[in-house]
Amino acid sequence: MLEKTNPGRVWIVSLLIAIMPLSFALPIKAKAIPAAVLFLLGVWMLIRDPEARAACRRARWVLGPAALAFLFWLVNVAVHGIDWREFDVTSHILAFLVIAVAFASPLRPVVLRLGFGASAGVLGIVCLEQHYIEGIDRVYGINNGLWGAIEFGMFMLVLALIAVVQALRSELGRGERVLHLVFAALGIYGALLTQSRGPLLAFLPVFVIVVLIQSRRTGRWREGLAFLAIGIAAAAGAATTLHGEVLTRFAAVTEEMSTYSEQDASGAVRERLEMWRTATMALDDHPLAGVGLNQFGDYARARIAEGKVNATVERYDHPHSEYLEWAVTGGLPGLAVLVLLFGCALAFFLRHAFHPDNAIAMPASAGLSTVCMYALCALTDNVFYRPMPHSLYFFLTLGLAVHIGRLLYAAERPAAVR
């Protein structure tokens, strides 16, 4: 039974889960240890624990599309005869499906929320060190190169939003709420230092959604709207007074879009537009089967050799849009799988984000903010091709869905059975 478990196991599993998000952003091999332990625990629970299987069934609307994505790309690689090394990152979905089962264990919520929030704080401090001590203009973390700044910014904002959710919980002590505010502020400021336009733009509507949902649930509209106003004002103030380069990058968008042509495709925005044009060409050529997993770069370079695509995008292997990535490499069926992956998770978490029980509503809000951030960032960037953001998404969404499934199952069981 859920209540008759070893207290030591509860703390150990909770701690392992709590440190996982931070481990994804660290370049140390030891980070595989907690993942391996949780994986083995997940296997054991699937075999021996009927309550864990029941929790997974209640989370099927999130787990099912993830399993479908794994199978879809497995078949895609086999059909196209692609080197199996291209399947490496995508294959991790299977591992996270099993790791998610560990979330069906009884857990200490305080350990999870502090662990996730502290991850945002630690990574924010890393950004401060890189910018103000090392003198790096556009920070990118310690597990990325300069090209990883965008994904790193999104990564921190996802964790910062989870801290925001906790800071809005009136039932928590003032000290813990203030701590979550500090974690959120560090994560958001760190993301600002990455100067990543896509994640910063995506963050604003998701931040508003999270605050409004909590205000609606609790009826504390005045506090929620004040929090919203202060948060937006602080972010705008930091962007304008401390880091004008962020606004400069945003201002360049309009100018580059208005001057883009097939002959003039230099610059971050113009190059994106040229990649998107190339992606539509690939989709027209291969609407059903796609060109194969991770094969956009080869397709683009072949079109460059034919003189059909500007050579400025020769260095890119992905089209800087996850939706176009799945459409180009997997055809229209691949795009449908991605929409299903985001859409089903979004519906599941949104449904439970208004639950009267905070134990269910809070992880649902965290899952909702994660899916929203990734779905919006996916419009202008690839969010799954690097292990770090790929791992965070599937770890959080699959795990939180199973955790919610466990709580729903426990609430539905007759009192006599409990």
Image (spheres, rainbow, N blue to C red):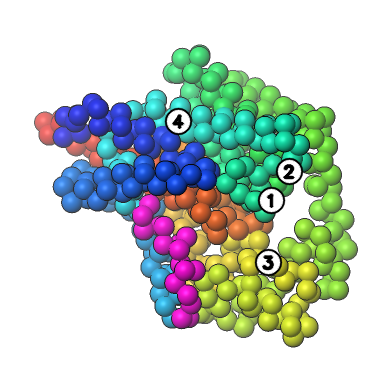
Report, in whole angstroms, how far the alpha carbon at label 4 lies from the one at label 3.
Answer: 35 Å
Report, in whole angstroms, how far the alpha carbon at label 4 lies from the one at label 2.
Answer: 26 Å
Q: Amino acid at mark 1?
A: Leu
Q: Secondary structure at mark 3?
A: loop
Residue marked by disc 2: 138
**Rendering coords of residue 132 (x, y %):** 74, 31
Compared with residue 369, is residue 11 higher up or lower down, i.e. above or below? above
Mark yes or no: residue 285 visible.
yes
Report, in whole angstroms, how far the alpha carbon at label 3 lies from the one at label 1.
Answer: 14 Å
View extreme (top): residue: 174
Q: Residues within 10 Å of mark 2 (few under 14, many from 20)?
A: some
Q: Residue at 64%, 72% (x, y): give it.
A: 297
Q: Which comes before the other along the chain, label 4 or label 2?
A: 4
Q: Which comes before the other along the chain, label 3 or label 2?
A: 2
**Numbered tag placed on residue 316 in the rendering:** 3
**Rendering coords of residue 129 (x, y %):** 67, 32
**Numbered tag placed on residue 115 in the rendering:** 4
The magenta segment: 80-96
Q: Nearer the viewer, mark 1 or mark 4?
A: 1
| Quadrant of the rendered image containing residue 327 | bottom right
Report, in whole angstroms, how far the alpha carbon at label 3 lies from the one at label 2.
Answer: 20 Å
Q: Are marks 1 and 4 in contact (CB under 8 Å)?
A: no
Query: Where does the N terminus fall, quadrant-wise?
Result: top left
Report, in whole angstroms, how far the alpha carbon at label 2 lies from the one at label 1.
Answer: 8 Å
Q: Main secondary structure of the magenta part?
A: helix
Lateral position of residue 272 relative to residue 35, left or right: right
Q: Residue at 37%, 32% (x, y): give it.
A: 15
Lateral position of residue 369 relative to residue 17, left or right: right
Compared with residue 172, is residue 353 higher up or lower down, i.e. above or below? below
